Image (cartoon, rainbow, N blue to C red):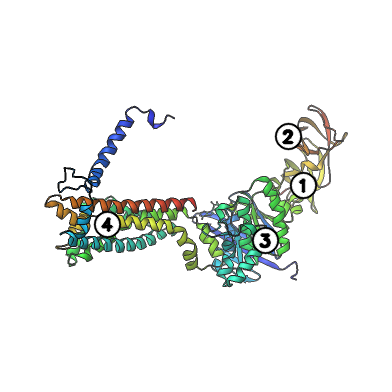
Amino acid sequence: MKSKMTTAIDIRDVVKTFGEVTALHGVSLGIADNAFFTLLGPSGCGKTTLLRLIAGFEDVTSGEIRLFGESIARLEPNRRPVNTVFQHYALFPHMSVIDNVAFGLKMQGMDLPARTARAGQMLEMVHLSDYADRLPAQLSGGQQQRVALARALAPAPKVLLLDEPLSALDLKLRQAMRVELKQLQEDTGITFIFVTHDQEEALTMSDRIAVMSAGQVQQVGSAQEIYEAPVNLFVADFIGETNLLQVEVHEVREGRATVTLPGGHRFACPSAPVAPGRHALSIRPERVTITPGADLSATVDRVVYLGSDLQVLVRLADGSPFTIRLQNAARTEVPGPGTRIGLHLEEGAARLLAD
Amino acid sequence: MKGVRYYPGFLPLTVLCLVILYAPLIVVMAYSFNGSTSITKWGGFSLRWYVDVFTGPDAGRFGQAAWNSLTIALMAATSATVIATAAALAMVKGGRFRGKGASFALINLPLMVPEIVTAVASLIFFTAIGLTTGYGTILVAHMAFCIPFAFLPIAARLEGIEGSYEQAARDLYATRAQAFRLILLPLLAPGLASGWLLAFIISLDDFIITNFVKGAGMETLPTAIFGSVKQGIKPNIMAISTLMLAVSVLFVTAAYLINRKGQKTP
Ligand SMILES: Nc1ncnc2c1ncn2[C@@H]1O[C@H](COP(=O)(O)OP(=O)(O)O)[C@@H](O)[C@H]1O
Ligand SMILES: [Mg+2]
């Protein structure tokens, strides 16, 4: 077994321009072997472009892409041991399901009995053995998706690329497929590079996540790292729900800053390395508790019922809006609108961000 | 929105148009089964003029003309389809290149140039380069003017085929040639078939250009029919016309059906 630290894909200073448009501004990423790696970012940030560069459908403008140490940036797509699950699956409409799955094996020169057996196994793995002789048009969206997965995995690629494969499915199916995809990745041991704009999807499945914006990687880390220690404003805002407040920063030392909230409350919290002055502070709504007599006071505006959670919309002393999330447990006391309450920030609730 | 039947006067107008369009055809078809030698008086149902077409005094001339028409149409349609496919691939899948709009216009322009102008120009061209008019010049002219007719359905079909199919094939270790042969070509087949059929019918049917470039003694079916009609219409012409009509309808229907089937499973 390979060590956990083997790098499957090494992307160095990749720039990609389309005429006037620069889709990628110097992206560098190391993607470990055996990992479920996610590229997460809003639409248009360059995720698909990066995936297409790895697959070989586009040429890099400059930079280098290595697969297990070997440069692949100039190879034709059929010479890269990398397979893709396309966003709209791109199943060959004139071929049966089994012929679709066996296509890559056929192109690799595997003989008919061997590839039929292997394609059959792949269909079994995605629970579609009974559909081998159907045409793609005769399958549901979820089934087509599984065929696309089986087809891409059949030649046992070193890396599997998935471009928003779940976006065309309905919510229930999407949630079920998340678990299945992750299981599949662990069972096969193949490195998955998964593209999505859905942060929940990214957080639930990934070993590591690269958050992208405007053609650049903003942060790379585990789900916990990017959620709990976002390096900048973009990441904090994009991942999960948060309160962003402009605060006065007095001192930053050893990763902690002393700040003053707009209402005058002064405290210390973890910080990105920034210079004193005005900066954005992120406070996660679920890390704030209502504690009578706490230093930070607020007035309740409204309570929004979300089922498992309650969202309490409050105003701080200076009138700035602020959100708290409470679990909808039996013992939760819900303050009524107009009530003055005290807020306690748990450790890790607040974090000072770089711009 | 009101249905079309609510517009007053629309129905009679439609019927009038249909009558003007189809009455002559119906008369020709009906009288091709006439038992008498008159072209206006009905002498009972008979197949004598169909027998006459194949065995009568003009059978040899029309047979030769029909053979010329058929072989020219086959070759012209086939070569026009190949050329049109290459053009469509470049236009639709070739990405952006300089002069793309102009190329598109150039390919389709022959559809808009008056046929008589093309006919005169072709004759002048063949004479200028010293070609003797005959079977060969008809073939070359037909190959040329069939291209836009083959191009349109092929390009339309190609537009509908997403680039991701070819990319998926390349991703799964197919070379460019394999991706073309195993994926693009089968998906394009309905467009190729309807383009070929359309070109075939256009060639089979052409009169004006053929008449200019055919030279003396060389006839295709349309020019032979025209030549024969000049000496007075005989009922056997109606039988030949009806046969040609049947072939055309058959081909056009085939083209339509193939295209429709192709659309259902893209
Ligand atoms: N073939 C192309 N030609 C021109 N611009 C492109 C092309 N592909 C992508 N782009 C541009 O590159 C940027 C990134 O696109 P993309 O990688 O598709 O984003 P994402 O997948 O994150 O939504 C966008 O601004 C897009 O308009
Ligand atoms: Mg995309």
Mark 4, secondary structure of its residue = helix
Q: Residue B10, image x and y in percent? A: 33, 31
Mark 2, secondary structure of its residue = strand
Per the model, the C-alpha gap separating discs 4 and 1 is 80 Å
Q: Residue at x 30, y 52 (%)?
A: B246
Q: Amino acid at mark 4?
A: Leu
Q: In front: B206, or A245?
A: B206
Q: Residue at x 64, y 62 (%)?
A: A160
Extreme left residue here?
Answer: B231
In the rendered image, the quadrant that contains the N terminus of chain B is: top left
* Mark 3 Cα-neighbour bin, 10 Å: few <14, some 14–19, many ≥20: some
Q: Mark on residue A351?
A: 1
Q: Is mark 3 within 8 Å of ligand 2?
A: no
Q: Amino acid at mark 3?
A: Glu
Q: Residue at x 11, y 52 (%)?
A: B231
Q: Is residue B139 left or right of residue A195?
A: left
* Mark 2 Cα-neighbour bin, 10 Å: few <14, some 14–19, many ≥20: some
Mark 1, secondary structure of its residue = strand
**Mark 4 = which residue?**
B204
Q: Which of the two discs, 2 and 1, labels the residue nearer the N terminus? A: 2
Per the model, the C-alpha gap separating discs 3 and 4 is 54 Å
**Mark 3 = which residue?**
A124
Mark 3, secondary structure of its residue = helix
Q: In front: A232, or A103?
A: A103
Q: Which of the two discs, 2 and 3, labels the residue nearer the N terminus? A: 3
Per the model, the C-alpha gap separating discs 2 and 1 is 18 Å
Q: Residue B264, image x and y in percent? A: 48, 50
Per the model, the C-alpha gap separating discs 1 and 3 is 48 Å
